Amino acid sequence: SMNKLPDEHIKELKRAILRRSRSLEGEGRMIPDNYIASSSVSNDQLNLPAHNHRFNKPDTTGTPNSELSSNVPSIILFTFKKNLVFLCISFILLFSVFRAIQNLQTSINDQKYLGITAMSCIHGAMFFTCLWAPTFINIMSAKWAIVLGMFSFLTWTGANFYPKFYTLIPTALFSGWGQGILWTAEASYILKLAFDSSRVTKEAIDKEVFRFNGFFLAGFQTTHIWGNLISSIVISSSSTDQRSGMLGDLNVNWSTTSPPETTAINKCGGLYPCSPVPGGVMQVSDEEKYPMLWKLMGAYLTIGFIGFCLIFFCLDRIGARVYPEKTGFQICLQHLDLLVSHKTFRLLIPLLIFSGLQQGFVYADFNMAYVTCSLKLQFVGYTMIVMGVANVCIAVLIGVGANHVPREAVFGVGGVTHIGVMIIILIWVPDDNMLVHFIIAAALGLCDAVWQTQCNTLICITCPEAVDIAFANYRMLQSLGLFISFVSDRFMCVYSKLYFLIIMLVVSTMFYVLAEYRVRQIDNVVDDVFEEQTSVNRSRDP
């Protein structure tokens, strides 16, 4: 039956066999040395690498993606944990700051699309950087690439002390360039840590990779909470100062575009003006805005600098690199080849882009047209905290129930919920009821948790032979979605973007069904192959 497989299934079959062999190794079972030879598909047909440790004897000397491959690192287990903890804490500090500022950009810098333009530059620069980021990492090593990427964030945070086009835009481009390098270096560093740890502890490599990434991502998901908590406290204290007469009247300066009457509230949500509101949604002058802004950015810059110092002084340089044996041009070709020739990954491209589009809508349109417009600026932070808590809780539940609930069910619940939420906020005229805003934010957090967990799972399943390249492409496509979401604010109204998101989600779901079908089809074929091989091996046993 193997000879009847279409040619386009050969590579998919190889990946499925790699996945199955991975699970067999996790159970402590050895793969027969004559497995490939005894099957009707040859090693050449499957294009299996000769050095693949899953089909040959375990390699105890080489470490993938590292120049340190001759000796087992003489490093204790505590050092691995120390590096992972410092990396995780620094990312939590830095991205708590970045996400909080991102959530406020369309509200505090809404005049002449300044905030939208800055965020477009960040995500656009990241999109173009992801392809050649590995080349830069191979020159500097992962640690110093992370240091440089974090420094680019600090420059952009500092530019927000005086937000003008000539301060925000150049630093936004630099920050986006640094972010593309930062995420690629982070993945390379954690992968190197996991491989070195597996060689010292004798644990399975896959187990260590999942454990290190799981710990990092669990901490990173909390970044929705801490930075937004700081912004809410600082802005609320500024509002209290206003009520005491220090900065003027709160209702005039920090509320909606006009006094809180029904006519003003009706301009929020899907009815939010397509063109910029004269004076901005906050209706506050620079003299009144800067005291609050300086206090907020001072706190953010301090937190970001602490995260930068943790990396600079405490993170060990372990020599992590991305395919050091390949040139930058070859790595770029590998990125493009995965996007173009990998049949299952191509089907996931609309979903990966949609994951960025829906995040961009929340950061830009929901915060500006719903929260800031109908409530006040300080409630942006509280709303995003609710979304972050829901995101973390749902992600944990999905991970716990992964062995009991099929992926299709999780995806279906996320898709139906997200379409329902988008229809609700499309027809909903927001008022000053905080509970409704928080419920909708929690629902959006649920949906985002589904997309992020399922995208990560699908990447690992469909591209086991090039996970790092696949994740780099995932980040690139997600940044493309964010870029499109922010740029479209210049020519699309809120209701138009909601229609676009609904259509994009339907299209993504259709392609996901096809991708899931291909994965299941290949898995069924490999099930038969392994069962047949097991029967043959048992019959040969005396």
Image: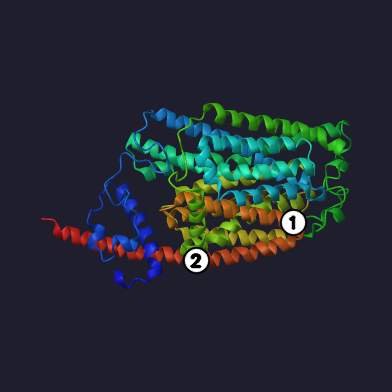
Earlier in the chain: of badge 2 and badge 1, it is 1
Frontmost residue, 172 versus 415: 172
Question: What kind of residue is marked 1?
Answer: Asp
Figure quadrant of residue 527: bottom left
Residue nearer the viewer, 5 or 530 = 5
Residue at image point 67% right, 37% down: 229
Q: Badge 1, how many Cα within 10 Å: few under 14, some, many 20+?
A: many
Residue 355 or 367: which is nearer the viewer? 355
In the figure, 345 relative to 385: above or below?
below
Identified at 59% across, 28% down, the residue is 309
Q: Residue 489 carries which label?
A: 1
Residue drawn at x 69%, y 36% as measured from the top left: 155
**Lateral position of residue 425 relative to residue 93, left or right:** right
Quadrant in which residue 385 is drawn = top right
Residue 285 pos. (x, y %): 87, 40
Q: Is residue 435 visible?
A: no
- Name the amino acid, label 2: Val
**What secondary structure is marked by label 1?**
helix
- Residue located 64% across and 52% down the image: 359
Q: Which residue lies furthest to the top in this view?
A: 313
Is 422 displayed left or right of 131 in the figure? right
Residue 255: percent from left, percent from top: 83, 44
Look at discs 2 and 1 and give the one toward the viewer.
1
Which quarter of the image is occupied by the C terminus? bottom left
Percent position of residue 58, x then y: 29, 44
Q: Do the residues labelled 2 and 1 touch (CB within 8 Å)?
A: no
Give the left or right position of residue 219, taking residue 375 as reference.
Answer: left
The residue that label 2 is drawn on is 513
Q: Residues within 10 Å of mark 2 (few under 14, many from 20)?
A: some
